Amino acid sequence: MLPLIFDTDQHLTEPPDFWSDRFSKRFQDRAPTFIDHPTMGPGWSWDGGKTVRAMGLVSVGSEDPRKIGRTKSYDEIDPGCYDAKKRIEVMDIDGVGACLLFASGAGFVSLLPGDDFHLEAVRIYNDAVMDWAQTGDAKRIFPAALMPNLGIEHAVAELERVAKKGFVHYAFNQWPSGGTYPSAADEPFWSLLQETGMTMSFHGYGGGRPKSPPKDESGDEPGLRLPAVLVQEMIAALRGAGLGSTAGLATLVLSGLLERFPTLKIGLIETSAGWLPTFTERLDEAYMQHRWLGGYRLDQMPSESIKRMRVNVDREWMGLKHRDAIGVDRLMLGTDFPHIGSFYPHTRFYVELAFQGVSQDDKERMLWSNAAGLYSVN
């Protein structure tokens, strides 16, 4: 018998009224609105139509795979994608007792130009997503906070604010001071994060916020940013193989961050896990061979630091096959609902197949207690 599932990777399709009346008058003309774009179809418009994010592939839910497409409106998708009470019903159907919740279209706030607008949008998202979770069940839905990418002062201030609001984790997107690599300027953020007990969710690893506005990639309308939808699928697949996270993960470990902050908690989300033993072996090898080049020394091998992290399995069996090498106490489950790779409404059926041969005790740890412990959820 399967225990309840702690789903470490669900996403929110922001409902039509998600941003309503939250922006100041100064930014009303740039506030997100849902439009039917002539090229992209239904989607979220930022900057008065200069940035458009189609909604289809991130709002698949329970849709027939033969009908999946990027041009979807709210009346065509499962209400569990955007309605908090319906999300609880979805979770009940799949046997999911609790979930971590990450942004979908709202993740675009990290790409938009204008420092003041970016800061306001991040704060509004964090307030709105917590309100959304509480409308469903705040004891079962745990949204990830976003952090502004404007410098250490803003990051520390927002971390302190969201911790007081009850967030248990935030979605890592960039080094807190805004640089390409970790630096001494980041230390106050890590110190506060450790103090709050919140977890860093290393969600696929984002590249952070560009220093200048995104260039026009559409080829037709000036200023219109049209994400390559097919590439989106490929990116998800690469994340699922860990390829989107390895560089950032290596930098995090080799910088000595985990040694300086020994109780910092980290979850690797939407990365899968089967690649981790080989990556860890190669990281140890690289450190031993080249540790003199950077002029730094660690007190322990990189593999020991990585053992502190927990990692989720999703659309793979290799993570479970190599669970002894990874560590049963480190594995969690993520479904990516309602994105294109989710299993709903057949999650428990998939898990039954994937977890064949796994003991009941190990199932309970991988499906519930490992995640609950990392994210301090009863």
Image (cartoon, grey):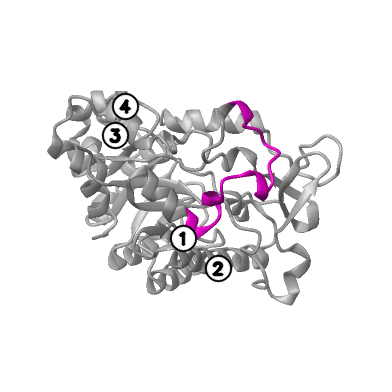
Q: Residue at x 78, y 51 (%)?
A: 50
Q: Is residue 68 magenta?
A: yes
- In the image, the segment drawn in magenta is 66-86
Question: Which marked residue is nearer to the observer: mark 3 or mark 1?
Answer: 1
Residue 138 point in image, percent of width and height: 38, 65
User: Residue 123's mark?
Assistant: 2
Label 1 neighbour load within 10 Å: few <14, some 14-19, many 20+: many
Which badge, 2 or 1, is on the more N-terminal residue?
2
Mark 2: give few (<14), some (14-19) or many (20+) Cα within 10 Å: some
Give the mark, 3 or 2, whose residue is nearer the N terminus.
Answer: 2
**Mark 4 nearby-residue class (10 Å; few <14, some 14–19, many ≥20):** many
Q: Secondary structure at mark 4?
A: loop
Q: Which residue is mark 4?
A: 274
**Image quadrant where one finds the C terminus:** bottom left
Q: Quadrant of residue 88?
A: bottom left
- Disc 3 or disc 2, which is closer to the eye? 2
Report the Cα–Cα distance between label 4 and label 3. 26 Å
Q: Nearer the viewer, residue 248 or 110?
A: 110
Marks 2 and 4: CB-CB under 8 Å?
no
Q: Position of residue 110 (x, y in %)?
A: 59, 54
Query: Label 2, label 4: how many angstroms apart (C-alpha)?
Result: 36 Å
Assess whether mark 1 and mark 4 are in contact (beta carbons under 8 angstroms). Answer: no
Give the percent coordinates (x, y) of residue 107.
57, 51
C-alpha gap between disc 2 and disc 1: 9 Å
* Callout 1 amino acid: Ala
